Image (tube, rainbow, N blue to C red):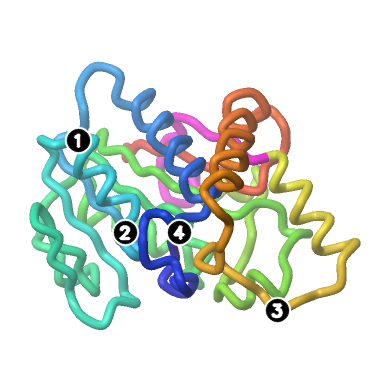
Amino acid sequence: MDIRETGTAQTDFARHPWERARLEFIINIMKKSFPTEPPASILDIGSGDAFIIDFLSEYYPSAQLAGVDINLPAPMERGRYTIHTSLETVPARKFSMVAMLDVIEHVENDADFIKDAAERFMESDSLLFITVPMHRFLFSAHDRWLEHYRRYSADSLRKLAGDCSMEIIAHGQFFFSLFMVRAAQKFLLPAGQPKGVGGWHGGSLLSSLITSFLDFDRRFLSFLPGLSGYLVLRRK
């Protein structure tokens, strides 16, 4: 969850179904990208409230981890790892996997940001995982509230990979159903007060139903346009 969206989601029970389904999608892509052995080290840039990196620490128990989130008021100690408040304070080393999950849309110059992080923290054959909001025509007050500079297209993601001298290993979109919902919200419904996923107050039954539906979406509808996009890049 983005720090901007923290809201009232203080416990695991309050997690938005989108967060749970998105995590499943990300882990599935990571498993496919490391088919023979898990990553030895992971850097999570944009850790937010640590939901994903906490899961990665359990899923990859032998990996060395570090996180970064510039919106934290102070470094966050999480037992096996630290979430730093700046890339400059991360101990100098190379990671076999770097994650920027819904991060680069917050950065004015995304290509320079990626190239700088790759130079600092990636070696040849390290993998970079990126997720972003898709479809420029869906840019709305919700994006401005989240302090997004842009939404992406398939072409702009391919261009970004080229600008960063990265090899595309995998790419695509996910959550077609949410793409349809967001399009309806923008063009058919009156604008309301933007809310992040931290505002979720659905009960456990509703959460389970939505999570199951989104799981079906990610498994079987990923050939369709999605609200989110992903890139897996290898440093050349």
User: Along the polypeptide, which appears first: circle 2 or circle 4?
Assistant: 4
Instruction: Identify the residue under disc 3.
Output: 193
Residue 52: image location, x then y, percent: 34, 50
User: Along the polypeptide, which appears first: circle 2 or circle 3?
Assistant: 2
The image quadrant of residue 202 is bottom right
| In the image: residue 70, left or right of residue 78 | right
- Nearer-the-camera pick, 136 or 81: 81
- On residue 60, the disc is 1
User: Along the polypeptide, which appears first: circle 1 or circle 4?
Assistant: 4
User: Along the polypeptide, which appears first: circle 3 or circle 4?
Assistant: 4
| In the image: residue 204, left or right of residue 82 | right
Which structural element holds mark 4?
helix
Magenta residues, start to end: 161-175
Label 1 close to label 4 by CB (< 8 Å): no
- Give the CA separation, mark 2 to mark 3: 28 Å
- On residue 25, the disc is none
User: Along the polypeptide, which appears first: circle 2 or circle 1?
Assistant: 2
| In the image: residue 89, left or right of residue 166 | left
Which structural element holds mark 2?
strand
Instruction: Identify the residue under disc 4.
Output: 14
- Give the CA separation, mark 2 to mark 4: 23 Å
Instruction: Identify the residue under disc 2.
Output: 45
Disc 2 marks a residue whose amino acid type is: Ile
Disc 1 marks a residue whose amino acid type is: Tyr
User: Along the polypeptide, which appears first: circle 1 or circle 3?
Assistant: 1
Q: Residues within 10 Å of mark 3 (few under 14, many from 20)?
A: few
Which structural element holds mark 1?
loop
Q: Main structural element of the magenta stretch: helix, strand or loop?
A: strand
Disc 4 marks a residue whose amino acid type is: Ala
- Say above or below: 22 vs 39: below
- Give the CA separation, mark 3 to mark 4: 20 Å
- Give the CA separation, mark 2 to mark 1: 17 Å
